Structures are given as C-alpha cells and as structure tokens.
Amino acid sequence: MLSPEYKGRVLVELLQNAHDAHRARHGDGRVEIVLDEDEGEHGVLYVANGGRPLGYKNFEALCSIGLSSKRPDEGIGHKGVGFKSVLQLTSAPEMYSVTSSASKAFDGFCFRFARDDDFDWLADQVAPGHPEAADQLRANLSSLKVPVPVDDVPAAVAPFRRRGMVTVVRLPLRSAEARLEAVRQLRELTDDGAPFELFLDRLGKVTVTHRVGGRGRPSVYTRKVDTLFTSRDLKIQQITLRRRTRLIMVTAAVDSERAREAIAAGLGSGPLKDGWQALGNSAVVSVAVPAGNPLERGRLYTFLPMGTQRICPVRGFVNAPFHTDVSRRTMAESTQWNDLLLDTAAEACARATALVDEGRVVLPAGTLIDLMCWEHDQVRRLELAFKAQDREFDAVPFMPVLHPAGTRTAYRWGYLWRGPDQARVLTPHAVAAAGVKHVIDPQLHPRRAERLAALGTARGLGLVPPVSVLADWAESVASALAQGEFDAGKWADYYHDLSVCFARTGEELKGRKIVLTVDGKRAPAGDPGLFFRRSDGPSAALPALPPGLAKSISFVHTEIAWAGRKTSRRSRGRTWLEEQGLVRDYSPKALLEVLGDAMRKVREDDEALREHLLFACALWASSVDRHGKRPVIKGLLVPGRKTWVPVTEAMFGDGWTGGHGGIDRALVRFFDRTEAVSRDLVAAADRVVRPAQDICAGTRTDAQTLRRFLEHQGVRHGLLPTYVATSQAVKGQHLNRPSSFP
C-alpha cells in the first residue's frame, strides 16, 4: 500500500510533519533530530518538535493511510501517506506526546504500532482457537492501523520533554541496512547545497545530532529573517542560515484569478484533486538567491528540497506548492498550475529588480545577477514579466559597473572585460577612472560572469567589447595618464598592456592619441611624423630640424622606462609600437618620407618651404641605401615663378648649371614669347623652378648638389607635355579625312 516513490524520503517526511505541528507566521518553532547508532541493536532515529501536541485528529490520520487533517495551504504535507514511509527504516514506529504545553512529561498519546507478535495477541483476542488468524491478520492488515499503547516512556525519550519538545517520533531501526540508509538520509538532509531549513518559515531552530561510538556533537541550524521590503503582494527578506549563510528571498503572491483558472483546469481534466481549491487565494512563490558566492546549480522546493532531476530556472532556490509526484521529488507532467507558479517566480524576480532600479530597495550586486540570469530555455518567462511592466529585458540595468560608482548597466550597453593578463595600467578600473561608463565590475564571481556572458551571447548581445571600443578606452586611459604626474615606469607598463591587448590589431589604434611625446602631450599613433629618437646610431648624426619642419615632427618621451630591471616586459611595449607601425625609428629615410606632408602644412610660408627643401636636399645627399640608391620624396614641393608646385610637375629654367643649361634657357624664352597664345602655356610657365641662387642664398647648400637632388626627384629639363581637353562636333564622313576637320 506504500508507494515506492517514498523510498529514501523518511527523514524529509518526518521533518515536514514536525514543521507543520507549529503555528504559522510565528517563525520560532524548534525541531530536534537525533540519530543514535549506539542505542538498541541497530540504532534509533528520533524526530521531535516543540509545536502543538498530538491530538485525536492527528492520531486518527496517522492510523489511516491517505487521510490527513490538513488542507494544501495549511502546511507542507497534506496527502496523508508520508508518515507511512517510516516502515522503510523500522518495523514499529513509536509516538510520544503531551496533553498540553504545561505537561512536565509525555502524558498524552504515547503508543507504538504493531509488531509481528502483536498480531498473535490480537488474533487470540478476536479469534481464540484459530491459530491461522494471526497470519491472516499480518497478511491483510497494515501494522500502521494497529496502535499499541505504551505505558512506560523509554529513558532516552524523557530528556526531549525537558528541552521543550512536545512530540517525539522514535524509530528503532530494523537492520544494519536501515541504519546505513538513515545515515545517508541524514547527510543528504544536511547537505549545504540545498539548505533544508530555508523555506521552513515556522521554525527558528533545528538541532541535528548524529551519535556513534559514544560521541556526537549537535549541529544547530537557525533561521533568522530580516525584512527589506514589503507590500501587499510582494516581500523581500534577508534570510540568515547556518554558518551565517545569507540569502535574499523574494516572495510573491500568485494572482488569485489566474490561480483559480489554473486549478479549475487541473481539476477538470488534469491531475489535481479536490482540496487544491484552497490555494486559489493563498498560494505564494519564493525565490531565494545567495547574497554571497553563487551556486553551481539551483534547486526546486516544495518547502523542502525536491530531487535534482528537475532543472531549476535560476541559480538559486525556488519554492512553490508545485504539483509533484507522490514523493515530491519531481514535478509532475507540465500543467497549467505549475506553469503559473514558474511565471510568478519570474514576476517576483522582475519586480525585485525594478525596485532596486527605482532605488526603493538595496540588494547585493550578485543577487541581482542571480535573479536575472535564468536558464536559457526559461528566460522567456522573465522577458514577459518585464514586458508587463513596460520594460525591455535588454534595457534593464542590473549589472554593477565601476563608473559611476554604485550604478548599474543593462545588456544593451554593458561590457564585461577583465583586461589583458597581468595588466598593470590598462585595467577595467583604470578605464573607469578615465570616465568610461558601462564597464561591468570585474570583481564579479567568475561563475556569475560566465552566466552573464552566456546569456548575452544567447540573446545576440555579446558583452565582450569590440576592438574599436577597446581602442577608445586605451585613448581615454592615455589621456588620464598624461594629465597626472609623469611616471616613466607606468607609461612603459601601459604600452606593454597595449601590446597584449592589441597583439595583432594595432592598426585599430592608428589616429588615437596614445603616444606621449617629449613635450608631455599626446600624439596620434601611426602619425608619419612620430618617431623614437635614439642617442646613438644613424639618427644621432642627423642635422637639426628647421623650425617649420620641427612642428611636424614629434618624438616619443625619451624618459619612458623601456629598460631596467623589468627590461623584458617593458621593452616589449616599444618593440610592439614599431612592429605595428604606430611609431617609427628616427632615420633619414623615415624623415624624408614625412617631408612632403610637412611642406603641405606650411604651403603659404615661403621661407618655411625653402627651409624644408634645403633640409631635404642635405638629408638626401647623405642618404644612400646599401644598393647605392637615394630616396625619392613623395609630395615634395619646389618653388615655381609664383607659387610652390609639386616636384613632378616642375621644369628647370634660367640660373641652373649643368649640361642642359641651353635647353633650360630656351624654355624660358619660349614661355616669354607664348604668353598670349594659351592659358595652359601661361600655367606651365609658372611651374619653372626659380634660379638656384635665389633658393640657396644665405645657406651652405651647393647649387650643383641642389640641381642633382631636384633632377633625382623629378624636375625636368625642357617642356613637359601639356594635356588640353577640347570638344567639338565632327561629322562621321570627316573622320577619315582629318585635314577637313573644321
């Protein structure tokens, strides 16, 4: 007659009964559980409570399988069969109670249930002379229907009354196997992974003692409640359990109209039975999540932990009057009632999160994440709960950020970033200190961070910042560093961190002002005029820069600690800057490459342009690569008659020596005689380079050297072809006779 589903649930069922013996809404009840392996042949299990004494209705229910004096909303147990599970551990359970709270000893219902030899006595009383009657009774009558009075209370039971207990269940264990099973159940009950006392709101203290070999220290499980927020249908509490374990519990009332509808559907064609209607106006759902470190997995409860077969939607504990199988290990098949309870759990989480956002309640950062990070296949419930509040899930701020302090961000804007490995400067805290918002606090527990990232990915909202965003952050950190006092080591560490974070993506940093120069300002990385200056090597012998050119050239701060005791780490930052093309080594070739750009910046300053040109000539004269070739300068300008023109469009004129002097002079005469012929020729005449003596005046530059330099750069001797675009109508019949064109 006893369902096998109750196997392994004896202790849970007895604890449920002990809890229900106390008055609701008091929260100060007491229960004692003792497993004494030294007593009797195989040990004895005790479960005692300090609630209401055992009355006649309770006695009648215990002796009638399937009969219970409680409605579903009056306590944890209500099916009336849980107590029968004790037969798995004992052949004759015993009960001891008092008549009233004033009793000094167990003077109320004190009885045990029938043993095998009791059926012999009973058969002799009802059917004397029929020896077969005892066997017939044993085969057809449950021992739990035959209570036997106990006149002498065992010595081990009496101390429970002195400690304030009013009812004691005593189970002499039937075998060594039963003892091992009792030990297993006790360990399962006290497992920290699912605190049994969490939702036992009628209790304030549970004492558990496992005595073996004369030794056994009581373990005390307390439950302290602090209310953080309360309204008509929502309550938020902090529950403090064993070893100061703190959890935040959100309790929401189930909407009564929806509850009655779901119960009616379950009664009509579903699995619910009569009696469930009582929950229509009283059902509540609680969600409890840790205030400290997160859980590896959640657990469903029906006041006490259910089995692990059913996945909990949150990494916490969800308690509700679910419709379950008989043993309450697993939820029954999907029902409208169970769906409603899970929807209410989602609504509780959404409402609690909204209250925090509105500043009406304060909760730990990790708690909010646990309330929001539902399992992927269940998160739709949470989305609908927020939609009912006219909120979008992805826009709900619940993730703690570093800046501004004490604020939160949402999936839509937040970034989860821990910085490069072993970073010292480019860290999330440094990014936040530079004024960047929406950087999620990296101190989040790794499990919570992983869940945030996984849920974001599942929703197509990755929390990992893209390279472009990281580049913005790097620039912000450089700005903050530049505003503070110069720290040679910190700047070197900053560039090392960049080399790790942007190991192969340095291109993204080009144009960002991240390079500290000798004047304490920041220059854009990748700028053609940005150089490392060495105290030795070819760059040390370069001529001084002309004032105009110096404005286009920047040097990396020479005091940055690229070397020292941390040489390998810090020098890596400098090497990386060169490898990624963000800073170049100062050399004649590199300097010549920027002269063209520098000249365009001072195009209206004739003297500055002349200084640039003569410097380029001097640098060119001393620059020969290993193949004997000299560089060609891109974008070089030379002085024409009126303005400075690109070197590739210029022509030599009067005042230049060399073997082409006759051609140069003839060209000048040609332009003088054709000024009135064509505007294009007038424009070409303006591209004739001024005489060498005008350019070299007051300098040490040799005219012949300047001529060779300009020839190498592309200045021509003689007239450059001039291309003129014209248009006119020509009949097709004239195409074969060009001489006849109009």
Image (spheres, rainbow, N blue to C red):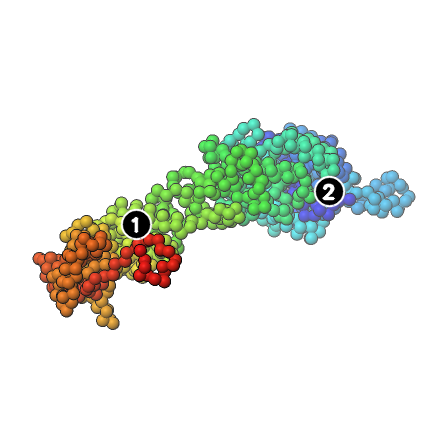
- Looking at the picture, which amino acid does disc 2 mark? Lys
Q: Which residue is located at x 38 percent, y 39 percent?
A: 404
Q: Disc 2 and disc 1: Cα gap in Å?
A: 77 Å
Q: Secondary structure at mark 2?
A: helix
Q: Which residue is mark 2?
A: 84
Quickly name the residue at label 1: 513
Which dot, 2 or 1, sits closer to the camera?
A: 1
Callout 2 touching callout 1 (CB < 8 Å): no
- Disc 1 marks a residue whose amino acid type is Lys
Q: Point out the image quarter for the N terminus.
A: top right
Residue 18 lies, in percent from the top left, at 65, 37
Where 155 falls versus 667 (above or below)? above
**Quick check: 470 above or below 542?**
above
Question: In which image quadrant can residue 673 be found?
Answer: bottom left
The quarter of the rendered structure image containing the C terminus is bottom left
The answer to which of 583 and 623 lies nearer the viewer is 623
The image quarter containing residue 312 is: top right
Q: Nearer the viewer, residue 92 or 400?
A: 400
- The local crowd at label 1, few if under 14, some if 14 to 19, many if 20 or more residues have their Cα within 10 Å, is many
Is there any visible trace of residue 161 in the rendered image? no
Residue drawn at point x = 86 percent, y = 42 percent: 123
The reply, left or right, for residue 236 in relation to residue 308 is: left
Which residue is rendered at x = 74% and y = 35% of the image?
A: 268
**Lateral position of residue 633 relative to residue 53, left or right:** left
Residue 4: give x, y in percent of width and height.
73, 47
Q: Earlier along the polypeptide chain: callout 2 or callout 1? A: 2
Comparing 88 with 723, the one in front is 723
Residue 240, image x and y in percent? 52, 38
Callout 2 environment at 10 Å: few (<14), some (14 to 19), or many (20+)? many
Q: Position of residue 678 (x, y in %)?
A: 22, 54
